[in-house]
Amino acid sequence: MAQSRFPALMVAASFGLAMLCVPLADIVHARQTPSARIATSYGSGPVALSVLQDGEAVVLQADGQAYTLNMATGAIGPQIYRVPAGYQAVDIASGRVSGNLVTCFSLNPRSSKDGRSFVLQVTPDKREVWTWLRVRGVYVGLALEPARGVAYAANSTTNEVYAVTIGNQNVAPRRVAAIPSAVRLGAMAIAPATRRLYVADMGAPRLYTIELATGAVRTVDVGVEETRALAWDGQRKRLFIADSGHETVLVVDPNARAPKVERVVSDKRLRDPAGVTVAPDGTLWVADEAGRSLFQVSAEARSITRTVRWAPPKSAM
Amino acid sequence: MLRPILIAGVLSCSLATAPQQAEAQPAALPPTVRLSAWAPDTSGTGVRFEGLAPFVETDPVVMQDEIANGAFEYAIDTSKINWATDCRCYRHYAVLVKSRATGVVTRHKFRALPSGSFDDQYAEVMLTITAGALTGDTRIALPVASAPGLEPRPLLEITRMRASPESLSLGGLTQVRLTVKNVTKGVPVLITSAVVIRPETPDLWSGMGAALSGAAPIPLPADASETLTVNIQPQTWRAIEASLVPTEADKPHTSFHVDVPYANPIFGNRPGSAEFTVPLRFRPSILSLLTSLVAGVGLGSLIPLLASKRGTVRTWGRATVTALVVAIILELVGIFLVANNSKFVLFGFNLDPWQTLPVLLLGIANGLLGFEAAKKLKFIQDKKADD
């Protein structure tokens, strides 16, 4: 009996040996885990900023990383989003749409092979909505109209402005205005109360106002050298212009009969104003890309009141 | 405080105005500064420089050279160049000019509008400074680059020593060494963040990581190299599964993709990435092969014992030992032959003595023939005699 069981036991044992022992030798000397080095990302300067909610703004870094900024303390918060490597984020606009916080990015492809541009909408829980901008071109300026749940994107190639429905990628972008006389449309700002859109011309010293209700376009000569950002001050009904050519921030009432452009701040520290936004307390926050700094500016005192060196917290990749 | 100025190379200088004119007509207005376009060929590829309105510079600046027989001193600042999508240009190159007549320093900013696809490099352009009747020009070297996305090739090149797939232990930690080289024409490159490793089959691995010599950012001068070590550890069972079917020795079982992110610090850390795919072939350790062979022989030798119920434990043991010795010899012969470019292909399957399954099959075959071999070698008696 014992002898008849022996071969069967040996077969089972051999199978076990074959299946278990072969990799055993490999497993035994493989207990050490590979040391994955977690390095920090090497960023670049801030290029755009937008108020997200009371006291908090979102700052876009040139390489597509977005961080929060506490506008009361000047503290740079954690990275909230990183644009996929194949895209270049040019501008951001953020706000609360239908009760939800949303940050929009105007995205252009880095490679000329895939020429698709998008308005990307990201919520704090990292939910993404990609709205494809079907008309080809380089999209630059972005403005958000939270009350209507619409973002506006300026196509600097065709000189058209498109409206994108927030939260629904299946709704095709709608053309709001075309400005054939423009050299190159760029930065945008919106006056929500009057539903008026302000669009900078990157190739000419002027900007355009677009009545969103009627689509009417008006040209305003402002004598800027190189507009990189616009910000609307809804309380005082004035428009701030970041002019990196003149290395200054300008202010103008674009709805005046004879708009008068004034310098808000000209400071040696401010060399490359690339982004500007108006904080709820009425102060300005200016992003200096080449200077890698954020400046809080008092428009009334016409001076820099706070300098925040752009050093966002290092994030694990 | 002196602002940092990057010195652009001065290549040659010519004088267009006599020195006496410089003394007779001191420049009162800000001088006009021009940079010529750079066009390496007639294809339209190149860079055009567009000037902005000049400023009076109030910060002290260290001048680098002089022009127009000393009528102007100048310095080139390329430390603040960034790509701007809105103008499809690099901005700003700055030329600081000091008029010796007035002592006023003016800053002249330029946008560079690239067209076409070309390597990041230093290009010779003509700098011309004019004030009234005074004119001087000189050749300078400025960094130029094509628009992002139009670079003809990555600034870094990744290579590895061997052309065949990397051999990988089935269960252990294996290191794969790659070389990352800066292949630009004189432009430094920064490896900006952690290297990204993307396996072809993610669930095949229990661990995967990459390490460079230091912490990022790692500066890499032109022509310099950096060793990238990739540590990989497969999940043994899945690795065996992936490598079970015998294939050509140079055919990979799987692969992983390496992505080295970098930036060009001259152009505002313009990002890019160098990519490379490493083919992998699992190879069991000698101990694993031996275990496989022993298991195969044991299994194979049990079949005749079970089938005909012949022999005793003693004769079975002798037959098995004989089969094992023969199998080891055959395995060693196989390894030797394969090392010398021999192949054993059966029904389209390449039986590689370095793979687990062929070795197991070899063991089984030897085990099956163990009794016969032992009889031939007279280690055991004939069946009748044995019984």
Image: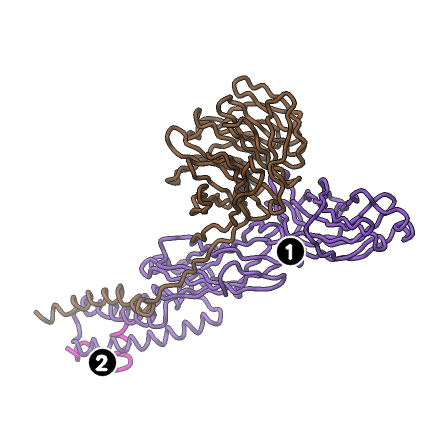
Q: Which residue lies under the disc numbered 2?
A: B380
Query: From what the image shows, is residue B303 above or below residue A185?
Result: below
Query: From what the image shows, is residue A89 above or below residue B20?
Result: above
**Does the CB distance between marks 2 and 1 fall below 8 Å?**
no
Mark 2 neighbour class, 10 Å CA radius: few under 14, some 14 to 19, many 20 or more = many
Q: Is residue B358 visible?
A: no
Q: Is the N terminus of chain B in the top left, top right, bottom left or bottom right quadrant?
A: bottom right
Q: Colour of chain B?
A: purple
Q: Residue at coordinates 56% horizontally, 50% vertically from top-left?
A: B271
Q: Nearer the viewer, residue B265 or A68?
A: A68
Q: Is tag 2's residue or tag 1's residue first in the polypeptide sequence?
A: 1
Instruction: Decide whether residue A93 is among the magenta residues.
Output: no
Tell me the chain of label 2: B
Identify the amino acid type marked 2. Ile
Main SS of the magenta part reads: helix
Residue stretch in magenta: B364-387
Q: Residue at coordinates 12% horizontally, 68% vertically from top-left?
A: A5
Q: Nearer the viewer, mark 2 or mark 1?
A: 1
Q: Is residue B118 visible?
A: yes
Residue B201: % across, % down: 39, 53
Q: Colour of chain A?
A: brown
Extreme residue toward the bottom, this view: B378
